[in-house]
Image (cartoon, helix red, strand yellow):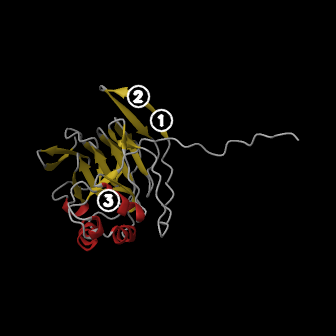
């Protein structure tokens, strides 16, 4: 009998992803969920279908006092996708794991890198996360002004999220509503910025956002953000530069 080698069907590899951490300060879902829903209703789609990690380090409660299953259900109702936990006691991690939230452990000292989690069996399997949307075509990185940059030459569609890790991001087309562009450095949009732009994602408070047609859903620099309704006297529809001054966001015309 001849043996036949089956073709390789898959490979498991650790990856490096930029994940948001929701640090719980109150253990009650009935306190967290309305506040979270109210905050992001002001920025429609900001966390829509975003994978998020639940931070437990700030909680000092007994594990049985945590309603992880209610928290998971509530987050999914807000179209946020909880994928695991970080921090907390061993008992708290086990309680979260039974609700379908495996513990995530940093690898190599970088919070953005995690081991592949192996979830414990849960009484109720969590629904699958939405399939990621493919990013727009991106040109190879190039060097400019001492910092690498990522170049995107086609419109960023609703539902797309593009992240320039350790680099500036340059978009030569429109960032449509519901799209998100993120950079550890500056964000340049040589078109209409109608979606969300996040600069200084690695806590660089000197990063800036530039847009030739400024009409965003949300802008953020180094964790400080402003939604559409909070842009004040920003020149909407004009060429704008956004920067931080202390903890205040400033909007200045370009040119």
Report which quarter residue 172 is drawn in.
Answer: top left
**Label 2: element kind:** strand
Residue tagged 3: 91
- Decide: marks 1, 2 in contact (CB < 8 A)? yes
Tag of residue 139: 1
Left or right, residue 40 beside residue 122: left
Residue at x 40%, y 36% (from the top left corner): 150
Locate the N terminus by quadrant.
top right
Left or right, residue 233 beside residue 55: left
Q: CA distance from mark 1 to mark 3?
A: 47 Å
From the top left corner, tell me how far across and down residue 36 is, in percent.
Answer: 26, 66
- Decide: marks 1, 3 in contact (CB < 8 A)? no
Residue at x 37%, y 70% (from the top left corner): 69
Asked whether 229 or 98 is in front, the reply is: 98
Tag of residue 185: none
| Label 3 crowd (10 A; few <14 / some 14-19 / many >=20) | few
Give the mark, 1 or 3, whose residue is nearer the N terminus. Answer: 3
**Label 3: element kind:** helix
Asked whether 253 or 248 is in front, the reply is: 248
Residue at x 30%, y 25% (from the top left corner): 146
Tell which tag, 2 or 3, sits nearer the viewer: 3
Left or right, residue 198 beside residue 48: left
Report which quarter residue 95 is drawn in.
Answer: bottom left
| Relative vertical location of residue 5 with respect to residue 59 in this rendering, above or below | above
From the top left corner, tell me how far across and down residue 67 is, in percent.
Answer: 32, 70
Q: CA distance from mark 2 to mark 3?
A: 48 Å
| Label 2 crowd (10 A; few <14 / some 14-19 / many >=20) | few
**Label 1: element kind:** strand
Tell which tag, 1 or 3, sits nearer the viewer: 3
From the top left corner, tell me how far across and down residue 229 is, in percent.
Answer: 22, 64
Q: CA distance from mark 1 to mark 2?
A: 9 Å
Tag of residue 142: 2
């Amino acid at each position: 009998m001849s043996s036949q080698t089956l073709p390789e069907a898959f490979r498991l590899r650790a990856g490096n992803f930029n994940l948001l951490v929701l640090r719980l300060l109150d253990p009650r879902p009935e306190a967290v969920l309305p506040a979270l829903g109210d905050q992001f209703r002001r920025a429609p789609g900001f966390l829509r279908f975003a994978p998020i990690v639940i931070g437990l380090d700030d909680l000092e409660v007994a594990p049985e006092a945590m309603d992880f299953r209610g928290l998971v259900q509530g987050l999914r109702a807000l179209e946020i996708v909880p994928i695991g936990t970080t921090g907390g006691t061993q008992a708290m991690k086990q309680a979260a794991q039974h609700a379908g939230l495996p513990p995530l452990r940093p690898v190599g000292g970088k919070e953005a890198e995690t081991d592949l989690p192996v979830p414990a069996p849960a009484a109720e399997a969590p629904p699958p996360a939405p399939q990621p949307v493919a990013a727009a075509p991106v040109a190879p990185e190039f060097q400019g002004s001492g910092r690498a940059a990522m170049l995107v030459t086609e419109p960023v569609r609703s539902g797309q999220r593009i992240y320039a890790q350790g680099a500036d991001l340059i978009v030569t087309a429109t960032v449509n509503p519901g799209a998100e562009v993120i950079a550890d450095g500056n964000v340049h949009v040589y078109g209409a910025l109608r979606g969300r732009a996040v600069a200084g994602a690695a806590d660089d408070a000197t990063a800036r956002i530039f847009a030739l047609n400024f009409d965003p859903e949300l802008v953020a620099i180094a964790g400080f953000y402003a939604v559409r309704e909070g842009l004040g006297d920003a020149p909407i529809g004009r060429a704008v530069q956004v920067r931080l001054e202390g903890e205040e966001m400033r909007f200045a015309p370009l040119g």
